[in-house]
């Protein structure tokens, strides 16, 4: 094949001595070239970090990187391949299917036969279905690839147990203010000029980045594009220019936990107005509404419980309504659930009972149930007393036999103590009635 003839345009560029490549964005120009250049992940890349220890042995197992966008997952994977002399191969679960995976695996096998290993980086690995995730298992087990998967979702819920058992999960953290400031300083050094911001505006720009390193550099680049000669922006001008307001708090830091704690305690304290205030502050800060919906469900089972059995139903319905409507319309459903919880009768009796039962279960985990409540599917088991003396509750006049169900060595226990309010008042009546029948039976 004859070489491609240069176009007239390319000749003009060459004659002028100009670069033909398009200008590279600032985040790309500042991409770390060594693992030591990565900021904000000292817990895994510092002197005692998990990856640092791994690299000291010159061995690398399959990994799952879990963390928010812009925290360096892709960059670290690429640098790991360089540090371990592995061929770097990258695919995205959004654009790849089984056929694409097969090609990647075949290429890795061929590469392995030539003495070169492959680090396969899979972006958004949680988007692969179960069958696709299972296809990684053989090539992980035989060493054809070292898998490094990246996900923004909780791997415990989104990845197969079989895949997780073969990989180590490393958590990437949102960048704190100091890390973002370090990125800005690096950008200023590369650009050879300071960001045209006063102190307050610079602090606002840090908050606008919201823990995302890539976003922070993109915002810095936009500030430089917008500034005229000698112009210095204040905070109000910055937000006007970028058409983006700073979040009320960093969702990965104390503000996030402080506000969700304030919301939870306001609901528990039956102050619906305070609860709505904190809910709206979190909506306004850009909090994930589904995170809030999950927390509201938790409040229903922890602080209302069976005092109002409809509380859990209402909260699950609010989550479904948000799924159906999206933002901002669906946020009203979550607000309605918060109002319902704040005005509902409160009880932590079910929550307390669960914790007490869990403690007892851990202490007496090896105790056998009493034989009379066990089935006897074989003659030997029947001769050993399995099922002997069992009373079928429906055959009793009250529908309650009062027989013992706890292990003999443990004796009868009481974990659940419902208060005399809400629907639990009715539950209390039933329990007292059954306790009376049990006491009469024991006489």
Image (cartoon, helix red, strand yellow):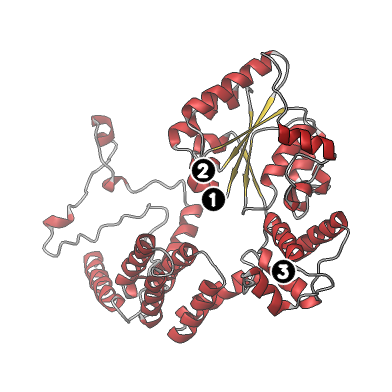
Circle 3 crowding by C-alpha within 10 Å: few under 14, some 14–19, many from 20 = many
Callout 1 secondary element: loop
Among numbered discs 1 and 3, the one appearing first in the sequence: 1
Residue 326, given in percent of the width and then of the height, sits at 40, 63
Which residue is the site of mark 3? Answer: 205
Circle 3/circle 2 CB separation < 8 Å: no
Residue 23, given in percent of the width and then of the height, sits at 75, 47
Question: Does 22 sit left or right of 123 as displayed?
Answer: right
Residue 395 to residue 337: above or below: above
- The tag on residue 203 is none
Callout 3 secondary element: helix
- Front residue of this view, candidates 368 and 138: 138
Mark 1 vs mark 3, CA separation in Å: 26 Å
Among numbered discs 2 and 1, the one appearing first in the sequence: 2
Question: Does 70 sit left or right of 39 as displayed?
Answer: left
Which residue is the site of mark 2? Answer: 126
Among numbered discs 3 and 2, the one appearing first in the sequence: 2
Rendering quarter of residue 199: bottom right
Circle 2/circle 1 CB separation < 8 Å: yes
Question: Does 224 sit left or right of 357 as displayed?
Answer: right
Which residue is the site of mark 1? Answer: 153
Residue 388 to residue 430: above or below: above
Residue 216, given in percent of the width and then of the height, sits at 71, 60
Quarter of the picture containing the N terminus is: top right
- Residue at 54%, 40% in the rendered image: 125
- Residue at 21%, 69% in the rendered image: 437
Instruction: Give the mark toward the camera: 3 or 2.
Output: 3
Callout 2 secondary element: helix
* Residue 75 at least partly seen: yes
């Amino acid at each position: 094949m004859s070489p491609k003839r240069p176009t007239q345009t390319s000749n003009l560029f060459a004659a002028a001595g100009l670069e033909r490549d398009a200008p590279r964005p600032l985040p790309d120009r500042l991409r770390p070239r060594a693992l030591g250049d990565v900021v904000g992940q000292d817990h895994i890349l510092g002197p005692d970090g998990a990856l640092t220890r791994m690299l000291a042995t010159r061995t690398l197992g399959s990994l799952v990187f879990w963390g928010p966008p812009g925290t360096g997952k892709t960059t670290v994977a690429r640098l790991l391949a360089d540090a371990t002399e592995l061929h770097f191969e990258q695919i995205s679960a959004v654009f790849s299917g089984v056929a694409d995976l097969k090609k990647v695996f075949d290429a890795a096998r061929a590469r392995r036969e030539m003495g070169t290993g492959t680090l396969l980086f899979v972006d958004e690995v949680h988007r692969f279905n179960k069958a696709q995730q299972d296809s990684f298992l053989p090539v992980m087990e035989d060493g054809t690839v070292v898998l490094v998967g990246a996900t923004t979702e909780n791997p415990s819920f989104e990845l197969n147990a079989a895949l997780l058992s073969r990989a180590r999960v490393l958590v990437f953290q949102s960048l704190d203010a100091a890390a973002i400031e370090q990125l800005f300083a690096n950008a200023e050094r590369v650009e050879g000029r300071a960001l045209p911001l006063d102190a307050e505006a610079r602090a606002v720009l840090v908050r606008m980045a919201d823990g995302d390193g890539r976003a922070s550099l993109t915002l810095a680049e936009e500030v430089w594009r917008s500034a005229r000669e000698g112009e210095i922006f204040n905070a109000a001008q910055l937000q006007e220019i970028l058409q983006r307001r700073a979040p009320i708090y960093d969702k990965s830091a104390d503000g996030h936990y402080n506000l969700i704690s304030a919301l939870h305690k306001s609901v528990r304290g039956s102050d619906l107005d305070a609860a709505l205030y904190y809910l709206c502050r979190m909506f306004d800060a850009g909090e994930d509404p589904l995170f809030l919906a999950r927390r509201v469900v938790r409040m229903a089972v922890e602080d209302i419980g069976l005092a109002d059995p409809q509380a859990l139903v209402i909260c699950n319905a609010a989550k479904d309504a948000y799924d159906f409507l999206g933002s901002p319309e669906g946020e009203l459903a979550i607000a309605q659930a918060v109002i319902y919880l704040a005005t509902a009768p409160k009880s932590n009796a079910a929550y307390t009972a669960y914790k007490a039962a869990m403690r007892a279960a851990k202490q007496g985990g090896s105790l056998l149930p009493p034989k009379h409540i066990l089935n006897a599917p074989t003659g030997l088991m029947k001769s050993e007393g399995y099922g002997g003396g069992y009373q079928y509750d429906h055959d009793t006049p009250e529908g309650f036999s009062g027989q013992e169900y706890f292990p003999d060595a443990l004796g009868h226990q009481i974990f659940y103590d419902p208060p005399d309010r809400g629907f639990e008042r009715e539950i209390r009546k039933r329990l007292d009635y059954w306790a009376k029948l049990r006491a009469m039976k024991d006489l």
